[in-house]
Structure formats: structure tokens, C-alpha cells
Amino acid sequence: MVQTVQQTMGTSMSRKEDFALLTGRTRWTDNIRLPGTLHVAVLRSPVAHARIVSIDVGAARESPGVAAVFTGADLQTEWSSIPTAWPVTEDINLPDHLPMAVDVVRFAGEAVAVAVARDRATARDALDLVEVEYQRREVLIDVEESLESTNLVHAELGTNECYTWELENGDIDAAFANAEVTIKERLVQQRLQPTPIEPRAVLAAPEPAKDGFTLYSSTQIPHILRSVIAGVCGVAEHKLRVVAPDVGGGFGGKLNVYPEECIALVLARKLARPIAWVADRSEDSQTMTHGRGQVQYVELAATKAGKLLGMRVRLFADMGAYLQLLTPGIPLLSAFIFPGVYTFEAFSIQSIGVFTNKTPTDSYRGAGRTEGIYGVERAMDALARKLEMDPAELRRLNYHPPFDSGAPTPSGLEMDSGNYEQALDRVLQLADYRGWREEQQRRRDRRDPVQIGVGLCSYTENGGLSPSRMTAALRLGAPGWEMASVRMLSSGVVQVVTGTSPHGQGHVTTWSQIVADTLGVPFDDVEVVHGDTEAAPYGLDTYGSRSVAVGGTAVHLASEKVLAKAKVLAAHILEAAEEDIEFESGRFSVKGIPGSTVTIQEVAGSAYLAADLPEGMEPGLSEEQFFDPPNFTYPFGTHVCVVEVDTETGQVRIAEYYGIDDCGVIINPALVDGQMHGGIAQGIGQALYEEAAYDDEGTLLSAAMSEYLVPSAREIPRLTLDHTVTPSPVNSLGAKGAGESGSIASTPAVMNAVVDALVPFGVDALDMPATPHRVWAAIQHAGSRSER
Ligand code: MCN
């Protein structure tokens, strides 16, 4: 039998996942129905800050079809506080965070009572019968005002400050004292609502035969969820199985441990019945953690020639009302990446976490890195304007020179590899940058009402979260390794068990490519198992663009171990020395002896038959691998956005969008392009359309999709993208992350383009989203200074 196996890595293999998705054969959490399932609905506080005077659930309990109604007080002995995994400083203020409010509500949407009924509609109707009396308290919305206020979100803490975290490298005062030019920008990162297609959903089921529970959840983190929720709800971890079935997107919003997951588990225990919950869209908007939420003061010190000397940042990070899994740590991810791709001598940052009466913040695609790169890239454009320099050339002047291992950053990190100038040159050429600048000048000269703006963003990000020793040093309570086991069955089919938990990224396809090429087996002969703590007992799940660089590498290394064992057995079968065995396309052969060959599938058969194994060899062909990388990976690139701004209406239209990205060695180009497209769409959404808006009473005005403008296909321009490939030295694949680059690069590129278009009007400050009204108002405001 001659087997020919096609090389798959580096090619755009079609996604294995899509057949089930396109033919409706998927398993979403809310489609799973177990016999006897009851449904829970959650009564949420309509007010943002109040003392609960009384809750009357009498009428709701009497209502037909209702099995039970509970208040937060009824359940308070069933659980403990939901912890944050990232207490960033020793003296951080950690408020209690029970899954349901007992005495005080601190944001609109906080759970105050639950009704359990035979169906969802009955449970929701029962909530209408619950009477709650609230005594309103002062509401804190603005992060800077909250820090100064004597009204407190958590009275027992005595302050609204959660923590202050500082970092200083080099002599920052000297850098500013010696500067010939300085700029200072106040930049606002508005809050965003993650909007995956599938809302959050959970089903908790008692498993009496095992004296335990199964929790199905639409989550990105089944393993972390199991550990944390077991502690919160007092269930032994080994008695809890967590399953993430098909998950319809998460974007960081499902990287958490939520009150509703605790509610379902506790009610399943209390009522001994499966309990199902699914969010409706506005419930998700109110209770899924929001992204971003920072006010940044960014200062740059430079010479007249444009050489950077230092950067000083003060940032106020809106924690919201409680600390969720990673809430305090997101601004640290910003802090370390603020210097971007540039070299300079001195850097300091002070990051202040502040409580407000709003939905808690946490990860959102690009978490922390988007905010940091936005800060530096908007500041670089402001500096370029002040120096009257081309922003591309200012960037070029300050790039870290090319490196293929270990380059220090001003924030004290060590980047893995990079070549920024190459990416810049490629994108300037791709975009015909000079051509656009000329067209811009023509429109400026003729005072065209539709002006052109050209915006750049050079970015890097610490993706591939992360080396455990680094997470520990940063006081993050979760390690960063990943685990895989690869077993070749006697049939020759390979089963891969991964600790990552995909929710749209295509790991089944990607892991199949890695295994198929390493073991020389057909792509279709690889099966990937994930998202079930019983099948994949160890793992740290999917976030921070870590899955390929960490989880994919674990799969690669486990496959190599399988291959190494198969080689020893092949040598035994072929009666040759191991050194004389060659391996190609799934076939072992003896050097120089044509015809003396055996396929890896035949070797697998022998390994399980175990009739004739080398002395001391265990039967079977299965290996396990933990991989803890020595460093993050640092994808990078430059994006160029060209906008047309109608200066009479304020309408912004993205005319063209170009990007050169480098995520190291690419496993599947089509999937990387898909990641870029999705990320860029999200970044455009932040720049131009999306905002989690609150009124002064703390009501979320954008809870409905009609008020929260996620861009549709119509708003997304043609994307002209390409790659450079700078392998990462920190993993055997040479791969870096790709899942967040688009959302990191695009927001500053778009905003820099909009501001660039408005330069002739004297506008140099503009907040997001750059809505027509905001742009128009900025033009009017700056009108008196106009040079037109
Ligand atoms: N890839 C590749 N070669 C590389 C890097 C990546 O081929 N060198 C491809 C792989 O096919 C891989 C995909 O890109 O499956 C993403 O890989 P990676 O960069 O490792 O990111 P993760 O799989 O860890 O995904 C996390 C990242 C994050 S943090 C968010 S948020 C996000 C995202 O991915 N949320 C998503 N992409 C999403 N895509 C979808 N559809 N839905 C979400 O919720």
C-alpha cells in the first residue's frame, strides 16, 4: 500500500467545523434538554444603586407552574463570594461579590430574585409578581468623579479606589526635562458590550449516580469555570463535570464565572432537578462583562527630530460594580504594551482601578492591549502633527530594530521576534500611501466638503497567554500552560484531546493540520475532542490568542512523542537500527533498502497487538504533553485606514483598509484571514459605532440591539490584507497568536484617519465612537480656529 499524504500546514484547509454549523447539527447549550428540566428566570435590579428594603415573593410562589422562588437572602448560605483571579496588588480592595444581591444592589441588572418554573415563560411571568422596595442611593457613573466621591459603591471598603498599580523604568522626569517637544492627550476608551451571536446559556444537572453535577455552559473556559465554581458553590471539583458544547462566539465576554452559572448549579442541588437558563439580548448586554472602560492621560517626550525620549501614562480603569475573573488585571495588560513597537529610555505608568455603579468590566477581544496600543498610536499621531512630520516616518524613526529573539521593551518585557519596518514598507506600498496623501492634498486644496483622512497603526501585543512564571509574577492566579494528548488508535485514526476550548476559531481544523503533518496521516483521520472536563481533564481554555501558540504547540509536541515511539517500533519491525529509519509522509523506511517500509498505521496496529514489542516498550501509541512556553508571543503589523469624512454631515465612510500582519508561522491562512476580518470589524465597531451608554441614573441605554450599533457587512469596507512571516522562537511551531490582532490594530488606525481628515479644521481631539454628530460637533467647535 502506497500512501500519499498531502502537506496541510500553511494551506487553507476547509473547516471541519462548518458542515455541522451549516446543516444545523450543532449542540448549543440551550438546545440540550434533559428529562425533568426546570427553567430559571432572574429578576434584575432596575436601579443602579440602592438598599433593598424588602422583597415580597409570596404571590410569585403561588403562581401556577412555579416550582420555587428565591431571593438573594434565601440563597446566601449556598455559596461564597465569586473571586477575582487577578488581585493585582497586595493591598487591592476586594469587595464581596455574591451571585445575588442580599442588602444592596450596585448596578442595574444585578440579580435580586429568581423564579424556577416548568417553562421559561412561566418563570418570567412569575417575576412580574415579585415586589421589591428599593431605597435609592447616589449613583456613580464617571470613573474620575467616582474616585473623588465620598459616596461609595462598597461602603465597607471606605473608598471607591480598587487599587493603584505603578511601573517606572528609566528616568522619566529627566526624559521630560530634556524634551524639546511634548504632547499630552486625554483619551477615552468607551465601554463596549460583547455581542456574540449565541447569548450566555447554562444547564446544571444533578448526577445522582455519581453524587455530582454536570454543568453545561456557553463558556470559553470550562476548566477554569470548574475550579472556580466548585469553590464558590461548595462542590468537590472532581464531582463536577463542566461541558462547553458548541459555543457561538464569546469575544472575551464568556471568559468568566457568572452569577447565573452559580444560580443554576445551586438550584440543581437544592431542587434535585436540571435547571436551565438562557439570557435574552438585553440581559446579556446588562450582565455580560463589558470591555474597555478607561480614561487615559498619555504624554510623550521627544526631540525636535522626532526621536522619542519617554512616555508617561496615567490611566483610570472603570472596574464597574464588582470584580469579575480578570477585571483588575486588564489595565495591566494595557500598561505593559503602552510603549508599542517603539524604543525609548524612560516609561512610567500609574493605573488606578475605580469602582462605579455599572456592569463589571473584564476581557473583550484585544483586552488591555487594544487600549494600550490605542493610547500610544493616537499619541504618535498627535506628536506627528505637532512636529509636522509624516506619521509613517515618525513611526519608522522610533521602531525597535529587527530582532529574532529577546528584545527588551521600555515596560520591561522581552519580545520574541519582530521586524516592524518591513511590515510598514509593505503596507505603505500595498496602500499606495503616497497616492492617498496626494489625493488628500488635492481635496484640501479645493476645500472639498468630503475630506480624506489617512490613519496608521503599528502594533504589537503580548498574545499567547502565557508563561506560568510570568502570570504568577503578575499575581494572576491562573497558570499559562496547555495540555494535549494524542493517541493513534489501532485503526490508524488519531484522536487529539486538547485543553483549549474553541468558540469559533477553528481549532478542530487547525489541530488536525498539525497532527496530520507531524504523523503523516490523512487530515480526515484526525479527530479532536475538546470542551468537556471529563474527556479533557486538564486545560486552561481559550483566550488571549493563546490557543495555537500554547495549545497547538502542546498538540505538536505530543504528536512528535507519538512519532518518536512509532519510530522505535518501526525499527524493531523492520529489523533495522533506529538511526537508519527515515520517515516521510506517514511511512517509515530503512535508509538505502528500497521496499523495506512500514506505514505508521501498521506500526499502530502492532503497538496495540503487542505480540512483538521491543524489550521494555509499553503497548499502545498514546502520549500526553504539557507545554508551558518560556515567553508570550508578540504578533505585530501595521494597518492603514483611509476614510472619507463628509464635513457637512460628520458622516465617516471607510474608503479603503489595508493591513500587513505577522503572526509568525501560519497554520491555516484562510482561518487567519477570518480572524483578521472579524477582529477588524470589531475594531471598526469601537471606532465608529459602538458604545455601552449610561444615563446619570445608571440605566444602560444601549441594552437593546436597536441602540447598540454593531457594524453589519454594509459598514465593513474591502479589506486588503497580507502577511510577513517572522517565526516565534518560543514554540516549536514558530507561531504567534492571530485572534486579537485585527481588533488591536484597527481602532487606532480608523480614529487616526478620522482625526487626520479633520486637521484642516483644527480638530485634534475626538472621542469614540466617531458618530456623525460627534464629528460634526467637533468641526463646529473648532470652527473658529479653522484654516480653511
Ligand atoms: N491561526 C493560524 N496560525 C497562527 C495563528 C492562528 O492558523 N499562527 C489560526 C488558527 O486557525 C486558530 C485561529 O487562527 O484556530 C486563532 O488562533 P489564536 O490566535 O491562537 O487565538 P485563539 O484560538 O486562542 O482564540 C482566541 C481569540 C480571542 S482572545 C478572542 S476574544 C476571539 C478570537 O480569538 N474570539 C472569537 N477569535 C474569535 N473568533 C470567533 N469566531 N469567535 C470569537 O468569539
Image (cartoon, grey):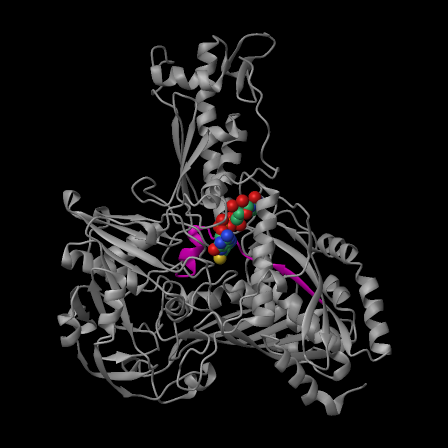
624 lies above or below 34: above
Left or right placement of residue 698 versus residue 783 in this view: left
Q: Determine the residue positioned at 39% across, 42% down.
A: 530
Q: Position of residue 411 (x, y in %)?
A: 56, 64
**Residue at left 56%, top 39%?**
14
Q: Is residue 339 visible?
A: no
**Extreme-bottom residue of the structure:** 784
Taking the spot 57% from the left edge, 63% from the top edge, the residue there is: 712
Q: Is residue 773 shown above or below 472?
A: below
Q: Residue at x 16, y 66 (%)?
A: 68
> Residue 497 sits in which quadrant?
top left
Residue in the foreground of this view, choosing between 715 and 260: 715
Residue 142 x/y as whole percent: 45, 83
Looking at the rendering, the stretch of residues picked out in magenta corresponds to: 455-475
Name above or below for residue 659 compared with residue 24: below
Residue 162 in view (yes/no): yes
Quarter of the figure with residue 93: bottom left
The reply, left or right, for residue 785 in relation to residue 680 is right
Q: Position of residue 527 (x, y in %)?
A: 43, 33
Q: For the C terminus, give its image quadrant.
A: bottom right
Number of marks present in the image shown: 0
